[in-house]
Image (cartoon, rainbow, N blue to C red):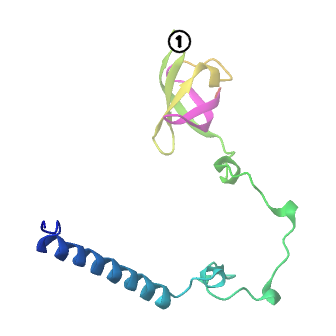
Amino acid sequence: MGRSQETFGKKEREKKRLKKKQEKGHRKEQRKANATGGDFENMLAYVDENGHIVDTPPDPTKRTKIKAENISLDYSKAANEVEEETELTGKVSFFNDSKGYGFIKDKNSNESYFVHVNGTVDEITEGDKVTFELEKGPRGFNAVKVKKIP
């Protein structure tokens, strides 16, 4: 008769594999037994009236009614910013008639603001004293509603 195909090494490897599989199953059972939470109620979290996350449901007596018409879904920076309606005064430090733009230097802050011919009410030239308002542009503030002071 011939010898068995299973050698000592093969038998040992098979034993180790089965033992590993049993240990893994045992650890899985222990994790299931020791698991906390598990059910849906233990996974819920609530937010209290101060905005903190808590485990207990909110108190219904502290509930406040909010009307749907009081809720504003539109948030724009322009609506919340306080626009200054005061006219500033300054002097035209540079103006190019052919290209239609220039700069106005503010009298109070000594800042220079860009002005385009479309933002002027009267025709302006270099050296004129003017009143103007500021408007936020893509590269900073622009002078608009520019009027010449007589």
Q: Quadrant of the C terminus?
A: top right
Q: Which residue is mark 1?
A: 97
Residue at 51%, 45% in the rendered image: 108
Q: Is residue 101 above or below residue 56?
A: above
Residue at 65%, 80% in the rendered image: 40
Image coordinates of residue 75 in percent, x first then y, are 69, 52
Give residue 4's quadrant in the image: bottom left
Q: How many marks?
A: 1
Residue at 84%, 71% in the rendered image: 66
Image coordinates of residue 99 in percent, x first then y, are 51, 12
Q: Quadrant of the N terminus?
A: bottom left
Name the dominant secondary structure of the magenta segment. Answer: strand
Give residue 118's quadrant in the image: top right
Give residue 49's quadrant in the image: bottom right
Q: Amino acid at mark 1?
A: Asp
Q: From the viewer's side, name the closer residue of 28 and 92.
A: 28
Q: Please provide the residue range marked out in magenta.
A: 126-146
Q: Is residue 73 above or below residue 66?
A: above
- Can residue 128 be found in the magenta stretch? yes
Image coordinates of residue 96 in percent, x first then y, are 49, 15
**In the picture provided, is 93 more to the left or to the right than 6?**
right
**In the picture provided, is 65 more to the left or to the right than 146?**
right
Secondary element under disc 1, as helix, strand or loop, is: loop
